Amino acid sequence: MTQASLIAQAADSAAGSLYRFDGRFYHPQPVTTGPWNPNAQHGGPVAALLAGALEAGDGNALVRITVELLRPVPLSALSLTRRIVKAGRSVTVIDATISADGVEVATARGLNLRRLDVAAPSRSASPPPAIPSPQPTPSGARRTPFASAVEMRFVEGSWEEMGPATLWTRLLLPVVDQEPVTAMQRAAAAADFANGISRVVDFETHTFINADLTVAISRSPRDEWIGFEMVSHVSGQGTGHAESRIFDTAGTIGRSIQSLIVTEKSPET
């Protein structure tokens, strides 16, 4: 299937959700497709699906997830399991695993902490920028069908440029059917764009796939808009990382980081 047909399918499915759940399996929709393999998902939907499973639901709030992308996550039926590692009054730790055809393809651990009203100063690294007016979908975003599920409004940088970027994002679809979307799901889905948007090597000459994603937020965003300051760093040893400051309209709420596997493409790739 060509990239153009994948994007067309993604647009057709954009009125639905990222996944359909049949009571047993999660079925990824075309909109979850990533940029590296037409048969594999973008890391953002996978992270968002796992984030939903890591919510404790016991009064503690999910403040950190670490996702390990063990292998390409296929566009096929997925099973999801969760295990409570620790259940406490102040701390709950949960593990979750996604499998395809009995093979584990992604795992994650979530840290849930008790939240209380505490008198403490609120400091932000810098005031958040205003949310720009709606922008047309940039041509670079068409490389990734999942980009049609996230509205992006750039403050600095763009899909077409390499280097750091600052942007506001808004997840346009439910993660699973009509289930409410959580704050961590919104943050995780968009944070996984960092390596692509802030790339320092070209898509045409290199791959720079992330093997993991960690997102930590100190509080829930005020609304559905979440902002990111994204930057990538690549070494000469085939590895790198992409990181983001995460903010909402009131200021900084967290950070994210991805570990990257950087490879030069062969001429025939």
Image: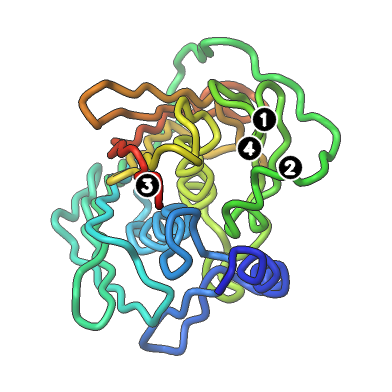
The residue shown at (71%, 67%) is 11
Quarter-of-image position of residue 247: top right
State yes or no: discs 1 and 2 in contact (Cβ < 8 Å): yes
Q: Which mark is residue 158?
A: 1
Q: Which residue occupies 42% across, 28% down? A: 255
Amino acid type of the residue tagged 2 in the rendering? Pro
Number of marks in the rendered image: 4
Q: CA distance from mark 2 to mark 3?
A: 33 Å
Query: Measured along the vertical axis of the image, is residue 91 above or below residue 128?
Result: below
Q: Earlier in the sequence, mark 4 or mark 3?
A: 3
What residue does disc 2 label? 138
- Assign a secondary structure to mark 3: strand
Q: Along the horizontal axis of the image, is 9 left or right of 260?
A: right
Q: Are marks 2 and 4 in contact (CB under 8 Å)?
A: no
What x and y, as percent, mark residue 150?
64, 51
Q: CA distance from mark 3 to mark 1?
A: 31 Å
Residue under the image location 25 percent in, 83 percent down = 101
Return the disc, 2 or 4, that comes first in the chain's sequence: 2
Identify the disc placed on residue 222: 4
Q: Report the side of 47 relative to 9 (left or right).
A: left
As drawn, the label of residue 62 is 3
Alpha carbon separation for disc pair 4 and 3? 16 Å
Labels 3 and 1 touching (C-beta < 8 A): no
Helix, strand or loop at mark 1: loop
Task: Measure how far apart labels 4 and 1 are at the Cα level.
Answer: 25 Å
